[in-house]
Amino acid sequence: MLPAQIRCTHHLAFSCLLIAVLLSACGGGSSNTATHVVNDKPASAISVFAGAIDAPGYQDGAASNARFAHDSLSGMAIDIAGNIYVADRGSNTIRKITPGGNVTTLAGTAGMREGKDGNGAAAGFFDPSGIAVDRSGNVYVADFSIRKITPDGKVSTLADSGAPLGWDGMGNTFGTPYRARGVAVDSSGNVYASYTGYTNTTIQKISPTGVVTTFAGMLKASGSEDGTGAAARFSGSSFLATDNNDNVYVAETNSLRKITPAGVVTTVAGSSGNYGTTDGTGAAARFTRVNQLVLDKAGSIYVSDENVIRKISPNGTVTNLAGTRGNSATQTGNLPGSFQNLGGLAVGPDNQLYAVTTGAILKIPTQ
């Protein structure tokens, strides 16, 4: 039998141990447990999906090993299976990222700058920017003209998808040729392209049978007027997106425009020529420099506005979703975070937002 003093000490130690275990099970009590909770990144945090922040390059492979050479004009799109496509403008290639994060090159060869049709690596791109994908998995790329990539990597150029209809090589372009900047596709397979020549922009429509028409806007006539078809005016570099009802949305510098299937153009939010950072509804909101955009299934719109991502609800109310103005270093973790060199945006089947930044694809919660 143990002496009384030793028995007491032994009993006290066992009791302390039991209390510690119970406290740990309840989520508290030990400094190690508390540290673990603090360091755990919550599921709603901004995280790196593929690539490496501030480490641009070109390399295929698993998510953390892959490298991207894109910039702010690099577009992004997601197919119905959750595969991500990136117009990696810095390397003139089109990259594909599986839902598991594996990165491959769908078409093009890094370093080759040539608008060349062909299969996979034999194809070339001159300056890829906007990108879209249809329900059959075909990828469309704005690359001066509109390029089409089949799911197996065959690249072709859509006929008559070059300079806008009626352009004579002259006009208000200051030596800058008209080129396709944005591209979108609707549920019927119609492809929409924004053609920009400083500062004029027109929107063209290419039917599945290859018929090309001017959908909205007019050559050599810049502005911000709403209207139907040729009566509407656009200016600046314009990226495009479509919604479930086949409306086309156009991102302009200080505003977001909407074109119905009948060609009626209205301004959803912002005001052309009025810069700012003000949240609000419709024309009361202000944008600094709208670049890329995407819509989710509920009809909310997300736009990159310099180094901030803004959210526009279906009723036109604009709020800041992520990013910190004045902070251009990319910071992951809890919202709002911050971004450098924001590029393309896409919404996945998981309703999470994906964004291009320098060297990486980020995953961002939308709630």
Image (spheres, helix red, strand yellow):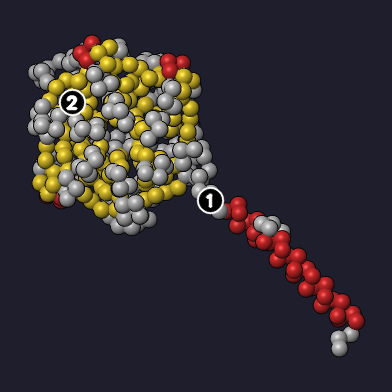
- Considering only order in the chain, which callout, 2 or 1, is on the residue closer to the N terminus? 1
Residue found 10% across the figure and 43% down from its top: 117
Question: Residue 318 at what x, y percent from top left?
Answer: 46, 24
137, above or below 245, in the image: below
Q: Secondary structure at mark 1?
A: loop
Closer-to-camera residue (3/90): 3
Residue 246 is drawn in which quadrant? top left
Question: Residue 302 at what x, y percent from top left?
Answer: 40, 32
The circle on residue 354 is none
Residue found 19% across the figure and 48% down from its top: 151
231, above or below 59, in the image: above
Closer-to-camera residue (259/261): 261
Closer-to-camera residue (176/228): 228
Q: In which quadrant will I find the N terminus?
A: bottom right
Tell me the amino acid under the disc marked 2: Lys
132 vs 293, left or right, is: left
| Neighbourhood count class around disc 2 (C-alpha, 10 Å): few under 14, some 14–19, many 20 upward | many
Q: CA distance from mark 1 to mark 2?
A: 44 Å
211 vs 255, left or right, is: left
Tell me the amino acid under the disc marked 1: Lys
Residue underneath mark 2: 205
Residue at the outermost bottom position: 1
254 vs 149, left or right, is: right
The circle on residue 41 is 1
Residue found 24% across the figure and 32% down from its top: 186
Question: Residue 271 at what x, y percent from top left?
Answer: 39, 16
25, above or below 322, in the image: below
Q: How many marks?
A: 2
217 vs 297, left or right, is: left
Residue found 74% across the figure and 70% down from its top: 17
Q: Secondary structure at mark 2?
A: strand
Closer-to-camera residue (245/269): 245
